[in-house]
Image (spheres, helix red, strand yellow):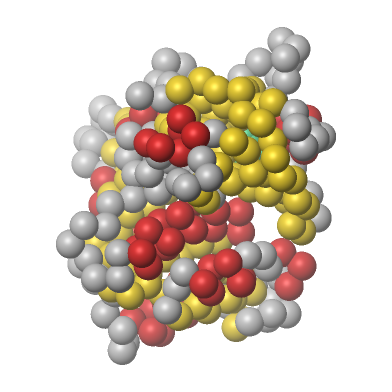
Amino acid sequence: MPKQIFAKLIEKQEIIKDIYKFTVEAEEIVKIAKPGNFIEIRVSEETEPFLRRPISIYNLNKEQGTLEFIFQVKGKGTKILSKKEVQDKIDIIGPLGYGTFKQEGYKKIAIIGGGIGIFPLYELAKEAKNQGKEIAGYLGFRNKEYVMLEKEFKEVTSHLEITTDDGTYGKKGFAINSLIEDMEKEKYECLYACGPIPMLRAVQKYANENNIACQISLEEKMGCGLGVCLGCAVKTAKSPKDAPEYFHVCKGGPVFNARDVEF
Ligand SMILES: Cc1cc2nc3c(=O)[nH]c(=O)nc-3n(C[C@H](O)[C@H](O)[C@H](O)COP(=O)(O)OP(=O)(O)OC[C@H]3O[C@@H](n4cnc5c(N)ncnc54)[C@H](O)[C@@H]3O)c2cc1C
């Protein structure tokens, strides 16, 4: 059951320009959160912006009862959030999301992340490592300036490939292409992806065509986060053309089986 808490901000770091990592005390959420869950943050006590902003859980520290999330300043809400200071209390509801990353039955897995979509994959990789799984990471960024969390992901993966679209850091090209090359010799049993829609489409296509299990986390624009406003609908893959059926990312996801959704 999600909880509403007023979490104390205990650490704030701008990891690259306009991307902040916040560490908050959130024991009640941390106790029950799973990889793939997200939180909804009320960034202001004023009526504007009214809607909470959804942000993925990046890291859970169960011993200390702290939670880390990372966000990019995009518009008004995240700008206000970025101005919070250590000791401030942040109004958070979480953990949210019914669909979380499932890794039972898999021993060798790969994560594929793009840009700010890499954040929810960290806790998954950490859990997989703690369970003794072999886990490879393929993280893609626009260019060198946007590369982040390399050291952190290295610690929780057995093989990490960083790609940049323009080749200014790591391997030139898209993360999915590096994964496909490696699949010739490595047989990952399940792929886990989060990132921009074109990347997710490519991962979904590859997984479906090659009959590989694949779970994707969608960061669809969201209203209430609780399944009431129906703002974050995505079409189900099996729905008839003349009568489309929808999932709601906040309630059904954010993590889905790649075979079930149509972008
Ligand atoms: C389940 C989920 C998890 C998310 N996790 C993270 C995270 O870990 N870190 C992070 O930085 N962001 C994450 N996002 C995206 C984040 O919620 C939005 O960037 C944020 O709500 C924008 O709020 P704003 O008020 O700053 O911008 P707004 O003023 O609302 O919008 C500013 C710009 O951002 C775009 N935008 C708004 N919402 C989204 C969205 N959901 N996805 C992409 N673009 C959007 C708008 O089109 C607009 O161009 C997540 C979204 C979802 C649904």
Residue 69 drawn above or below residue 110: above
**Picture coordinates of residue 219, whole percent (x, y):** 50, 42
Q: Residue at x 45, y 73 (%)?
A: 157
Q: Is residue 76 visible?
A: no
Q: Quadrant of residue 51?
A: top right
Q: Would residue 197 be found to the left or right of residue 261 on screen? A: right
**Picture coordinates of residue 198, whole percent (x, y):** 50, 57
**Picture coordinates of residue 67, whole percent (x, y):** 55, 43
Identity of the residue furthest to the front in this view: 63
Q: Is residue 101 visible?
A: yes
Q: Residue at x 47, y 47 (%)?
A: 63
Identity of the residue furthest to the left in this view: 105
Q: Is 113 or 261 nearer to us in this picture?
A: 113
Q: Residue at x 57, y 26 (%)?
A: 92
Viewport quadrant of the N terminus: top left
Residue 164 drawn above or below residue 216: below
